[in-house]
Amino acid sequence: MVPEFEKMAYSMKVGTISGPVKSQFGYHIIEVLGHEVRPLTSAQFDTLKQTAFTKWLTDAVAARKDIVKSDASVWSSLVPTIPTLPPTQVVPASPN
């Protein structure tokens, strides 16, 4: 639903008819026959959850001025390609 249409439709009371509402598709006259609340499906809920988290994360990163995004090639000089492991210590077996 386009924002102009949705805003008008949900702000009206049941049984009322709107004046002309302009949207990108032209002009509309809206008659509200009823409002209903539908529960979200699991997929819709997951999508909304992911969208909200992505927005939160984007906003949080944008608010931080100390986080510097850089080219991925910078990491290749900082992260070892071969892991370095500490020398292993041989623990003598306990006598049984």
Image (spheres, rainbow, N blue to C red):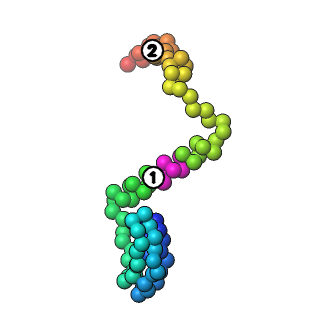
Badge 1 amino acid: Thr
Q: Does residue 6 show up? A: no
Task: Residue 34: give x, y in percent of width and height.
Answer: 38, 82
> In this rendering, does residue 54 appear at all?
yes
Q: Is residue 86 above or below residue 5?
A: above
Which residue corresponds to the image point at 60% horizontal and 43% vertical from the top-left? 62
Q: Which residue is mark 1?
A: 51
In the figure, is residue 89 to the left or right of 43?
right
Spot occupied by residue 63 in the image (x, y as percentages of width and height): 63, 45
Q: Which residues are magenta?
A: 51-57
Residue 60: numbered disc: none
**Residue 54 highlighted magenta (yes or no):** yes
Q: Nearer the viewer, residue 5 or 65?
A: 5
Q: CA distance from mark 1 to mark 2?
A: 37 Å
Q: Amino acid at mark 2?
A: Ile
Q: Residues within 10 Å of mark 2 (few under 14, many from 20)?
A: few
Q: Can you name the residue that lies furthest to the bottom here? A: 15
Q: In the orientation shown, which residue stands out farthest toward the front? A: 26
Q: In front of the other: label 1 or label 2?
A: 1
The residue at the point 37 percent across, 83 percent down is 33
- At x 56%, y 28%, the residue is 70
Would you say residue 30 sits in the magenta stretch? no
- Describe the element under mark 2 as helix, strand or loop: loop
Tag count: 2
Question: In the image, is residue 92 above or below residue 72?
Answer: above
**Nearer to us in this view, 72 or 11:** 11
* Label 1, residues with CA under 10 Å away: few <14, some 14-19, many ≥20: few
When the figure is inspected, residue 82 is found, relative to residue 72, above or below; the finding is above
| Residue nearest the observer in this picture, 37 or 18 | 18
Q: Which residue is mark 2?
A: 82
Quarter of the image with the C terminus in it: top left
